[in-house]
Image (spheres, grey):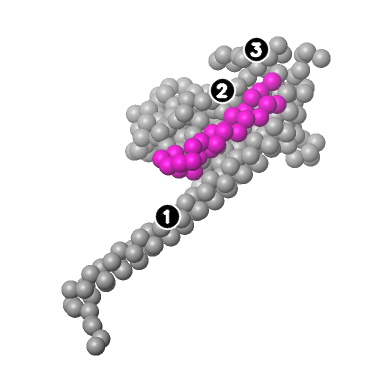
Amino acid sequence: MKKSFTLIEAIVIIFIFSILISAVGSAVVFLYKTKSYTFQQSVAISEARKGIEWMVKEIREAVTGEDGSFAIEKAEDFELVFYSDIDKDKEIERVRYFLVPAGGKEGKLIKECVSFTKGGSCSVTFSDFLENELEDAEIRVSVEGDLNSPNETIDIFGDGVYLGTLCTGSECGQCAGSYQDLTVFNVKDIAQDNSLEISALSSSKVDPFCDWMEENHSFKMRVEFLWEEKGLIEEKASFKKGVIDPTGFPPKYQKETEQFFTISENIMNEFRGEPIFYYYDSENNLLSPPIDLERVTYLRLKLIVNVNPNRPPDDFILISDVQLRNLKTNL
């Protein structure tokens, strides 16, 4: 005589079977996530290793810039600026490696204004642009108009504070039909309050007879406002590279032409309190900030990589040393 399952026994069997299926499913998901994370960590390490290899090659060949700048322009814990022919085109590029903290917002706004009066003025205003604390800010100002002689100039002011004068030499032409004499001003101090007014005042000899886009104007001003906010350093940060090619004669490095590349988006150096760049003199003495640029002959590069710092495996550390061939003094 066959014995059949009771309803209670069937329910128990189904319950046990469900638990087993759930356990197997959880194990599969865990293994998949672990494998996926391991793969992501491996890719991040590979990208960082490749980046540091390129850095070593480029830093090793650092030389004087096309504009006569010293081979190293800036040497800090998380930023290095130097000059090197990185693409072998016989022109020296300005190269910048720098860390961008996680969450560090970058912004860019462009505004223009025009004056229609002799010796006139105009202004633009930026407001409510910040979400977090300001890290740095700059404006890039250029002008167009009746500006072809030494007594036809434009004074630039930020929140009423004099910043500088444009078109003092041969940088500008009369009614050129394009913006000229691009000049960069740092405005971090006056932009901290989340408001910034940039005004331009022309000299009395600037007359209103130019017709580029607006008829009978004396001058026009274009302001490109760029800012960076402080990020959340307790999270992963991005390590980037910026490159500027020299232009014009005599050669200049225009900041607005900088091209950016991401080396890694999983860098933990700042959170761990470990610099990316260490600087040494010709006797292998570690230099302390502020770095005396002319004493630097040797660098150590250190990248701490971690795709997810909240779970194992631990940080992966890449270290490489590089001697600046053209700055060695101990030969």
User: Which is more toward the observer, 82 or 155?
Assistant: 82
- Amino acid found under the numbered disc labelled 2: Glu
Query: Which tag is nearer the camera, tag 2 or tag 1?
Result: 1
Mark 3 and mark 1 lie on one chain; the one further toward the N terminus is 1
Q: Which residue is mark 2?
A: 76
Q: Is residue 10 shown above or below 319?
A: below
Q: Residues within 10 Å of mark 1 (few under 14, many from 20)?
A: few
Question: Please, what secondary structure does the residue beneath circle 1 have?
Answer: helix
Q: Which residue is drawn at the image coordinates 76% and 17% (left, top)? A: 328
User: Which is more toward the observer, 268 or 30?
Assistant: 30
Query: Which tag is nearer the camera, tag 2 or tag 3?
Result: 3
Q: Which residue is drawn at the image coordinates 41% and 40% (left, top)? A: 310
Q: Which residue is mark 3?
A: 285
Snapshot quadrant of residue 228: top left
Q: Quadrant of the N terminus?
A: bottom left
Which stretch appears magenta? 298-322
Q: Residues within 10 Å of mark 3 (few under 14, many from 20)?
A: few
Mark 2 and mark 3 lie on one chain; the one further toward the N terminus is 2
Where in the figure is residue 259, as x and y percent of width and height?
61, 41
Question: Please, what secondary structure does the residue beneath circle 3 have?
Answer: loop
Q: Which residue is drawn at the image coordinates 68% and 26% (left, top)? A: 321
Main secondary structure of the magenta stretch? strand
Snapshot quadrant of residue 240: top right
Q: Which residue is mark 1?
A: 30
In the picture as drawn, the residue positioned furthest to the bottom comes out as: 1
| Residue 288 in sight here | yes
- Amino acid found under the numbered disc labelled 1: Phe
Q: Is residue 115 shown above or below 322?
A: below
